[in-house]
Image (cartoon, helix red, strand yellow):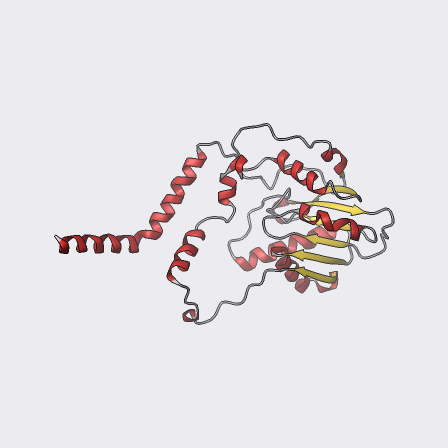
Amino acid sequence: GLEVTLLAKLFIYRIFQRYWKLICKNFFTFALLATASLRLPAVYSQTKPGPSINDDVSMENAKDSNKPCRSWRWGRFSFEALADAESRLLSIVRAKIVSTFVNVRLACSQIYTITAKGDEADERRVPLLFVHGFAAGVGIWAASIDCIAERRVVHAIDLLGFGRSSRPEFSDDPTLAELQYVQSIEDWRREMNIEKMVIVAHSFGGFLATSYALEHPDRVRHLVLVDPWGFPEKPVDDRQIRPVGWIRAVATVVSMFNPLSALRAAGPYG
């Protein structure tokens, strides 16, 4: 009896060891199918129509719409709730704010932009651009806008794939995806008719801003990095990387889905 029990446990362990990745992947698939039955809408299209750079959208109208979202329909996100949350964050800014959608070439996308300028701001000075980090948006800079907008024009953007900007499909190749981001920032600069700019960037935005500065050093007057991401080169010898077993297991499971998938699946509770 004991030998049979040990053999059975060993058999189950070997099966689990061999197929656990497939089991985890299927489990996540079933979870997605379950949430799909809750009428998750399609992802924000990169071709969603919006105003052009010449059509300024005053933030005053957005501030008048501070009403709670009353829809109980399950969804990944709500454009109305997103605009409402942004207007609440920016309500502390005293400088006049104008928002625009700037066209860029990647999949005919648009980068959402806010521009702030104080009454005594000198438009001849080099403008400043705020670039947010991962899973953030222009609202993260609300407490920092006024002190800078007193002397110069301040811009803040939602990077493609975040906030109110378009969600284009990026390359699966990390290097190409990075270049696509860099090119989108350069397209934005051209559309905004900015010769040089001071860039203040945080986290993931710091990584992209550094990449942009390396590609276009003549367009950056100063680069200020706030807790930037950094990615060292992968060692030539994989034996130099020996993560603990449970860390490797967790990393494998997490790599199967987008870091924000759980938040999106949570719908109105996310």
Query: Which quarter of the figure has residue 56?
Result: top right
Closer to the camera in the image, 147 or 168:
147
Closer to the camera in the image, 85 or 176:
85
Query: Where residue 21 sits in the image (x, y, percent)?
Result: 35, 52
Query: Where residue 95 sits in the image (x, y, percent)?
Result: 80, 44
- Image quadrant holding the C terminus, namely top right
For residue 15, say whether it is visible: yes
Q: Residue at x 75, y 58 (%)?
A: 198
Query: Where residue 66 sits in the image (x, y, percent)?
Result: 69, 32
Q: Does residue 80 sit above or below 4 in this rendering?
A: above
Q: Is residue 268 left or right of residue 224?
A: left
Closer to the camera in the image, 105 or 130:
130
Query: Where residue 108 sits in the image (x, y, percent)?
Result: 63, 44
Q: Residue at x 22, y 56 (%)?
A: 10
For residue 42, say whether it is visible: no
Q: Residue at x 17, y 52 (%)?
A: 5
